[in-house]
Amino acid sequence: MTREIEHVKYAKVEAPPTAPKVTDVLKLDGKLTVFGGLNGQFFIEEVDRGALGVMPGSDMTAMYVSVWDALRSGERTRAWEIFTRALPLIRFELQPGMGVSAMKHNLVAEGILRSAFVRHPTASLKAESLKELAFLRDFVREGAAARA
């Protein structure tokens, strides 16, 4: 794209496997600034391979900032501890057709949104899924509180 489109400077690697593709994209064109995608599922590996960040959903921004800060300050084990604690929630949100609804419910729980309404084709979470999501949200939050 950088050879064909004049102002392309950034790329988001979204399709799995993301980490190897970050390496491949940077080898093909060293001028691009590359970001990881796939809801940050391989954030640390992508950064290790040269990505300058990640573009996940908006409901776990503080967690991703904490991981980024730990990586930048050389606290690799701490970065993995923070990230690993959040992986069950990241995994939950990657379920096809449920991720946007889950993220919206998390943003409602944080007081950021007033409604978790989603449009078709995204499904609204049912009661069982909402209970699972609340547990995972609390699980991640408790891990953050323990680190503070």
Image: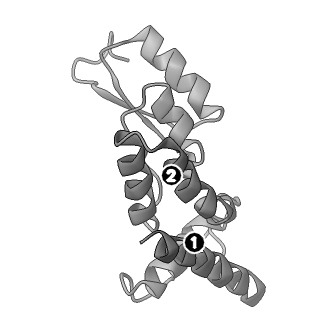
Which image quarter is the C terminus in? Answer: bottom left
Q: Residue 139 appears at what percent x and percent y?
A: 62, 76
Disc 1 + disc 2, Cβ < 8 Å: no
Q: Secondary structure at mark 1?
A: helix
- Against 81, is 15 above or below? above
Of residues 73 and 88, the one drawn nearer to the viewer in this rendering: 73
Q: Secondary structure at mark 2?
A: helix
Of residues 24 and 4, the one drawn nearer to the viewer in this rendering: 24
Q: Residue at x 65, y 35 (%)?
A: 16
- Between disc 1 and disc 2, the foreground one is 2
Q: Is residue 68 left or right of 125 when viewed as pictured?
A: left
Q: Residue at x 46, y 65 (%)?
A: 60
Tell me the colour scheme of the image: one colour
**Extreme-left residue of the structure:** 7
**Extreme-right residue of the structure:** 128
Which image quarter is the N terminus in? Answer: top left
Q: Residue 68, which numbered label?
A: none
Q: Residue at x 44, y 44 (%)?
A: 75
10 Å crowding of disc 2: few (<14), some (14-19), many (20+): some
Q: Residue at x 40, y 62 (%)?
A: 61
Q: Residue 40 appears at what percent x and percent y?
A: 53, 49
Of the residues shown, which amino acid type is indicated by label 1?
Answer: Val
- Against 69, is 16 above or below? above
Of residues 7 and 80, the one drawn nearer to the viewer in this rendering: 80
Q: Considering only order in the chain, which callout, 2 or 1, is on the residue closer to the N terminus?
A: 2
- Against 60, is 131 above or below? below
10 Å crowding of disc 1: few (<14), some (14-19), many (20+): many
Q: Residue 140, which numbered label?
A: 1
Can residue 12 be seen in this snapshot?
Answer: yes
Q: Residue 112 appears at what percent x and percent y?
A: 36, 81
Can residue 90 be seen in this snapshot?
Answer: no
Q: Residue 78, which numbered label?
A: 2
